[in-house]
Amino acid sequence: MASNVSELTTYMAYLEGEWKKSSSGETIAIQSPYLRKTIGYVQAVTQDEVDEAISAAHKAQKEWATLSVSARGDYLDRWADELVNNSEEIAKAIMHEVGKGFKDAQKEVVRTADLIRYTVQEALHMHGEALKGDGFPGGDQKKIGIVERAPLGVVLAIAPFNYPVNLAASKIAPALMSGNAVIFKPATQGSISGIKMIEALDKAGLPKGLLSLTTGRGSVIGDYLVEHKGINMISFTGGSSTGRHLSKQATMIPLVLELGGKDPAIVCEDANMDVAVKSIMNGAFSYSGQRCTAIKRVLVNENVADELVTRLKAEIEKLSVGSPEVDSTIVPLIDDKSADFVQNLIDDALTKGATLVTGNKRENNLIYPTLIDNVTEDMDLAWIEPFGPVLPIIRVKADDEAIEIANKSEYGLQASVFSQDIDRALAVARQVEAGTVQINGRTERGPDHFPFLGIKSSGMGVQGIHHSLLSMSRERVTVLNLK
Ligand SMILES: NC(=O)C1=CN([C@@H]2O[C@H](COP(=O)(O)OP(=O)(O)OC[C@H]3O[C@@H](n4cnc5c(N)ncnc54)[C@H](OP(=O)(O)O)[C@@H]3O)[C@@H](O)[C@H]2O)C=CC1
Ligand SMILES: O=C(O)[C@H](O)COP(=O)(O)O
C-alpha cells in the first residue's frame, strides 16, 4: 500500500458543532512514527475556547437529555454506519498517525462501530426499578421508590494514542447514550484519527454543541480541562503517572481511570505449551506490545522454562518486523523517546546479568522483538511497563512464588494463568491481584461488553459497555408517598 500523505492538511478543531481554526493561531505538527515526517497539523485550542465549548455543551445537554433513549440511539447508529462507510480512510489515518498495521487499524474501526451499536442496545435495555417501602422492617406499602438513571452533565473523555478511535468511542458512546454532553480530548498523537471519527459523528447529524473536540497538548490544556468547574465526570485512559496526577487535580467528581499494566503470564509446569506459546506471543508482541493489556512478564515454572524459552525464541524470530503498511507485527514505536525508554530497560537488565535470548536490535524507533531470560527482581524490566516489544522471563520454583511476584507489582490490570488442571488454574487465578485473570488465554480487553478494570496503579472504576453506561449516569430516586 502506497502512502500518500504528501499534501499536508491543517485540521480544524470541532467546537460547538463547527470546524474551526483556533484563535491561538497555533498548530501542533503530528509526526508519523514510521514515515518519520510530519503528516498534518492540528489546532492548539485555547483555554477561552475550552470555556466556550463547555458552556455550549451544558446548553445542548439539557435538550439532549429530554430526547428518548431510542432517539439518541438513532444518532449513534448513524455514527456507526458512517464509521463503517469511511473505515478505509479512518484506518489509514490510524496507520499513518500511530503506526498500527492497516488490517488492525481497520479492525479497530469496525470494532468501534460494533461497540457503538451494542452500547445503543444496552442502553435501550437498561431499566430502572420500583422499590416497595414495606420491604424494610417498619416500612409501608404506600411508599414506593422509583429508581431511574439520570445523566451527569458534561463528561470529559481523555484517550491515549494506542487505540485512538476505539478507546475514545468507548467513552463517547456511553456518555451520549446516558444523556450527557462530551468534551473529547484526544491524545495529541491520535488527534487526526480522533478528528476523522468525529467527522463521522458530525455527518450523523449530532446536535451542535453537544460534543466538542479540543485538540492540544495534555501538558498545556489537560489540567485546565480536568480542573474546570463545568466538567461533571472524567473518563480517562492513559499512563499511570498521568492518571495519578489527574486524580489529584479533579475534585469531587466521578472519575474512571484505566491506566498502565505489567500483566504477568503465569506458566505452570502442567501447562499446554502450544496454548501458552501462542497466547504469550500474541499477548506480548501484537502492535509491538503497545497495548495496556499486553503480556509484560512471564513467570514460568523452572521445570518447563527451557522448553518455553526455546519455543518463544523460535516464534519471535518468525515475527514480521517493519512497516504497518504491510501489516508487520513489530512496527516502530510511537516516538524516539519511547524507544529510548525500552532500550534503557533492556540495557539495565543485561547489565545486571540477564540473558539475551533474541533481539536487542534497533533502528531509530524500531525495536526488534526481544526476549530476555533469567530476569530477577533487582532489574527494572521485572517491574516497569515498557510499552514495547520486550518480554522478560522470570523463572520460579512453584505457583506460590509466581503469585507472590505477580502481586508485588504496583499494577493490577490483567494476568494469564496457563495450566491444564482447571482447579489449579482457578486457585492461582483467585490469588492474583488483577482486575481480570485469563485462564489459558492471552490478556485482552475484549470482548467489549465484559467489565474491564484495573486495580492498584492500573485504575479506578470499571469500563465495558454496561459499566460505562452506569458510571456515566447516576441514580435518580423519586419516592411516592400514597394516601
Ligand atoms: N488500562 C487501559 O485501558 C489502557 C491504558 N493505557 C496506558 O496508556 C499509556 C500509553 O498511552 P499514552 O497516550 O502515552 O498515555 P499518556 O498518559 O501520556 O496520555 C494519555 C492522555 O492523557 C493526556 N494528558 C497528558 N497530560 C495530561 C494532563 N495533565 N491532564 C489531562 N490529560 C493529560 C494525553 O494528551 P497528550 O497526548 O496531548 O499528552 C492523552 O490524551 C500506557 O501506560 C498504557 O498502559 C493505554 C490503553 C489502555
Ligand atoms: O490500550 C489497550 O491496550 C487496549 O485497551 C487493549 O485492548 P485489547 O486488549 O482488546 O487489544
Image: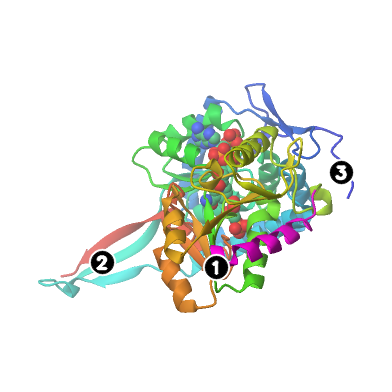
Report the residue at 62% width, 36% height from top: 344
> What's under tag 1, amino acid-wise?
Gln
Range shown magenta: 302-321
Q: Is residue 51 magenta?
A: no
> What's under tag 3, amino acid-wise?
Ser
Q: Position of residue 322 (x, y in %)?
A: 81, 47
| Coloration of the structure image | rainbow
Q: Which mark is residue 3?
A: 3
Q: Position of residue 328 (x, y in %)?
A: 79, 53
Q: Position of residue 55 (x, y in %)?
A: 48, 35
Residue 150 makes an appearance in the image: yes
Where 447 falls versus 218 (above or below)? below
Report the residue at 41% width, 43% height from top: 232
Q: Which mark is residue 27?
A: none
Q: Position of residue 473 (x, y in %)?
A: 41, 55
Residue 464 makes an appearance in the image: no
What's the CA distance linking mark 1 and mark 2?
26 Å
Circle 2 sits in a helix, a strand or a loop, which is it?
strand
Query: Farthest residue toward the left?
Result: 138
Image-based side of 424 in relation to 78, left or right: left
Image-based side of 105 in relation to 48, left or right: right
Dot 2 corresponds to which residue? 145
What's the CA distance linking mark 2 and mark 3?
60 Å
> What's under tag 2, amino acid-wise?
Gly
Pointer 1 or 2: first along the chain: 1
Dot 2 crowding, Cα within 10 Å, few <14, some 14–19, many 20+:
some
Query: Farthest residue toward the right?
Result: 2
Circle 3 sits in a helix, a strand or a loop, which is it?
loop
Report the residue at 57% width, 26% height from top: 46
Quadrant (top left, top right, bottom left, bottom right) of the C terminus: bottom left
